[in-house]
Image (cartoon, rainbow, N blue to C red):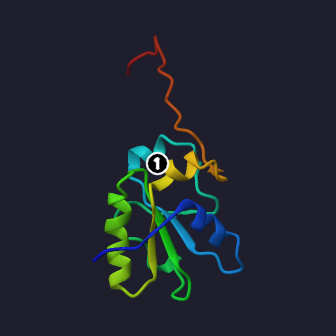
Amino acid sequence: MAIPRITSAELKRRMDTAAPPVVIDVRLKYPYEHSTITLPGALRSGPGLVDRSLLAPDRDVVLYDSDPEEIVAERAAVDLAASGFRVFVLEGGIAQWAAAKLPTGTKPAPRLAVPVYGAAKG
């Protein structure tokens, strides 16, 4: 099943309407955790099955990932489309959105644990 793509410009236009699509970040764990940006208002769902309780049947759903070929988003979108949702995949993923200099949200960067040297072992 082919899932339609939506450009960054078209998604931005739709996000500024009275009935914006539900935008869902389905990036794999590593790319998601090691990034500090998201699309504005995006919900987070892992790359597996998207939680349908996040969705309204009368609103479009747009999935994005970090892969320029949109492989992860495509897989999740196929499942939603088979369930009757109107689903789109963001063309070029978050990288293309950022390259277009469109607004982004932020999230905390990963924090590394600081090793403690000389701690007594017990």
Q: Is residue 115 above or below residue 107?
A: above
Q: Nearer the viewer, residue 85 or 117?
A: 85
List the single residue furthest toward the top. Answer: 118
List the single residue furthest toward the left. Answer: 1
Image-based side of 66 in relation to 59, left or right:
left
- Mark 1 surroundings: few (<14), some (14-19) or many (≥20) residues within 10 A: many
Q: Quadrant of residue 51?
A: bottom left
Q: Please name the residue shown 50% across and 30% down the image.
A: 112
The C terminus lies in which quarter of the figure? top left
Q: Quadrant of residue 13?
A: bottom right
Secondary element under disc 1, as helix, strand or loop, is helix
Q: Is residue 48 above or below residue 1?
A: above
Q: Which residue is mark 1?
A: 32
Query: How many numbered marks are there?
Result: 1
Image-based side of 16 in relation to 62, left or right:
right
- Residue 27: give x, y in percent of width and height: 42, 54
Q: Please name the residue shown 46% across and 11% down the image.
A: 118
Q: Please name the residue shown 56% across and 45% down the image.
A: 99
- Residue 103: give x, y in percent of width and height: 67, 53
Q: Is residue 104 above or below residue 83?
A: above
- Residue 1: give x, y in percent of width and height: 27, 77
Inspect the image, locate mark 1, and give the three-letter code of the amino acid beneath it: Tyr
Q: Nearer the viewer, residue 66 or 7?
A: 7
Image-based side of 79 in relation to 113, left or right:
left
Q: Please name the residue shown 46% across and 13% down the image.
A: 117
- Residue 57: give x, y in percent of width and height: 51, 88
